[in-house]
Image (spheres, grey):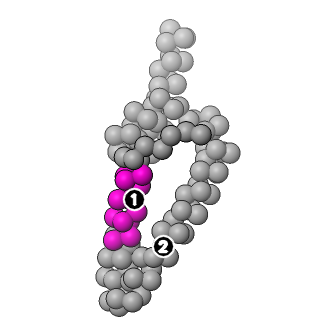
Amino acid sequence: MPKIKFPTIAKTATYSVIHMVIAFCAAWVVSRDLKVALGISMVEPAFQIFGFFLHEKAWDKWGKNHPSFDEETWHAHVGHGCHIATALESSKINKINEETKKQG
């Protein structure tokens, strides 16, 4: 069984609190009702967890096997906050450059 480090647990807990506070603020801005905002901020993270789970399953099934997926380029761009399209476009450019080098 892998060891769970305290910083990982603390990071998860603090992120959960921040997530609920943001959900509360957004719900309160929209509804201007304290009870509604509190309810949404408690329920929304559960939906988020379920959505993340489905996203991971879909990514494992279809995302990583896509021909335009170049993990090195992906991490270089997305890891620095660039848009996904930029990462995919860079991947295509890299492939074109490689093909040109092979031909020339």
Residue 53 covered by magenta stretch: no
Question: What numbered label is drawn on residue 93?
Answer: none
Residue linked to disc 1? 13
Between 79 and 4, the one lying in front of the other is: 4
Amino acid type of disc 1? Ala
Q: Amino acid at mark 2?
A: Glu
Measuring from the top left, give residue 23's x and y in whole percent: 38, 73
Name above or below for residue 33 compared with residue 14.
below
In the drawing, what numbered circle is on residue 44? 2
Q: In what element is the residue under mark 1?
A: helix
Foreground residue, 55 or 36?
36
Q: Nearer the viewer, residue 28 or 84?
A: 28
Residue 26, visible in the rendered structure:
no
In the picture, which quadrant includes the N terminus?
A: top right
Q: Quadrant of residue 27?
A: bottom left
The overriding secondary structure of the stretch rendered in magenta is: helix
What are the residue bounds of the magenta stretch? 9-21
Image mark count = 2
User: At 54% from the left edge and 62% from the top edge, which residue is drawn?
Assistant: 49
Q: Is residue 37 left or right of residue 57?
A: left
Spatial distance from mark 2 to mark 1, Cα to Cα?
16 Å
Give whichever of discs 2 and 1 has the lower sequence position: 1
Residue at 57% x, 35% y: name it: 68
Question: Between 98 and 76, which is closer to the camera in this rendering?
Answer: 76
Q: Secondary structure at mark 2?
A: helix
From the image, state whether disc 2 or disc 1 is nearer to you: 1
Vertical relation: 73 (above or below) 26: above
Question: Dot 2: few (<14), some (14–19), or many (≥20) neighbours within 10 Å?
Answer: some
Residue sitting at x 54%, y 69%: 47
